[in-house]
Amino acid sequence: MDAEKSVERLIQKAYGSLKSSDAEGAKLALNEALKINFEHPEVVYALKCLSWWMERLKKLSEVRDSYDRGGFILSQWRSFYSFLDRIGEDRKFDSCLYAVKHFVFSTALGFFGDILGEEENRYDPALLLQAGRCYKGVGNFVEALKYLEQAARFKRDDGETLSELADVNALLEEPRAAKALFREAFFLDPQGIELRNMDSELILRLANRVREMGYEGEELLEWIPIYGALFGVFSVNRELKLAELGRLKQSIFTLENEIRGDAGKTGLLIPRLINRYLWLIDHYENVQADPALIEETMLKIKITDPAIYERYRN
């Protein structure tokens, strides 16, 4: 029992060190715990995670620019999740992953912070986005919101930026804003959204429900907004401006022709087209358009995917 308590104490000490950006201190504590119980699953898991990151961070010496250093760290996050998949225990030890995440994003934030105060960088949307992501990663959602809102002002049509802003709004318990922003992001660029960067239950639960229906990879990202609408998650919509309506109709026309011309692309194009049909229906309802226009669009959904049509009707 005393040995178990000692191991647990050392694990918590290691996680505390990570949250204070002290990787070496964390490694020392975990190695001490390993001497007490060399088979302890969480200790072994945490050491694997920490060793992976310490090995990657050695490469920072090859990068001189602060922005590039921060960007390099964040670019490794997807690879880290691939590593977790390979070791077969992804998300088993949430406390470990939380501490590692805090360490990684605070380290990256340190590099971005070096240049955030410079006059020429205050309006750089890429830097603002990265800073917002880092603040979200360390759990400072209020500060993350500030930077992501600034980034979104410069990148109104960027799905990645809007998805990060939506995620933070959800974490701050602002569901209406989160739903509207997620809906917008998945309309603009579903393939530009990295689900593993998302932390809110709102989007993760929806993604898991759609994944359980058999969709993965690129197709999953295209179907999320469809089922988001059907399940009532993406329930906040808006009236389109005249120019937006024109672009939407042109996009629908183009996709219809692409699907007719190349059946091999339908896995991605069909949900993309249905999403646009749903946006058009929402617009017609918002402006109280002729019901015949809504029925005409509904008929197109029925022809494109009868199962979605039945779900939508019911």
Image (tube, rainbow, N blue to C red):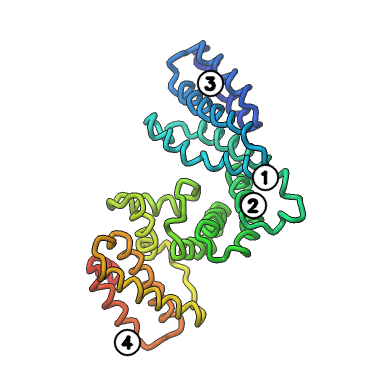
Query: From what the image shows, is residue 303 above or below residue 193?
Result: below
Closer to the chain start, of discs 1 and 2, is: 1
Measured in 3D between alpha carbons, the distance from the residue under mark 1 to the one under mark 4, in whole angstroms, is 53 Å
Closer to the chain start, of discs 4 and 3, is: 3
Could you say where residue 159 lies in the image, as x and y percent from the top left?
A: 50, 60
What residue would you read off at disc 1?
112
What residue would you read off at disc 4?
292
Instruction: Return the residue nearer the eye: 186 or 154.
Output: 154
Closer to the chain start, of discs 3 and 2, is: 3
Residue 53 in the figure: left or right of residue 88: right
The kind of residue on which mark 1 rests is: Phe
- Dot label at residue 127: 2
Q: Are marks 1 and 2 in contact (CB under 8 Å)?
A: yes
What residue would you read off at disc 3?
8
The kind of residue on which mark 3 rests is: Glu
Quadrant location of the C terminus in the rendered image: bottom left
Q: Secondary structure at mark 1?
A: helix
Could you say where residue 236 lies in the image, as x and y percent from the top left?
A: 47, 68
User: For the residue carrying disc 1, how many other residues have a C-alpha within 10 Å: few (<14), some (14-19), or many (20+)?
Assistant: many
Measured in 3D between alpha carbons, the distance from the residue under mark 3 to the one under mark 2, in whole angstroms, is 39 Å
User: For the residue carrying disc 2, how many other residues have a C-alpha within 10 Å: few (<14), some (14-19), or many (20+)?
Assistant: many
Q: Secondary structure at mark 2?
A: helix
Closer to the chain start, of discs 3 and 1, is: 3
- Dot label at residue 158: none
Q: Secondary structure at mark 4?
A: helix
Q: Secondary structure at mark 3?
A: helix
User: For the residue carrying disc 4, how many other residues have a C-alpha within 10 Å: few (<14), some (14-19), or many (20+)?
Assistant: few
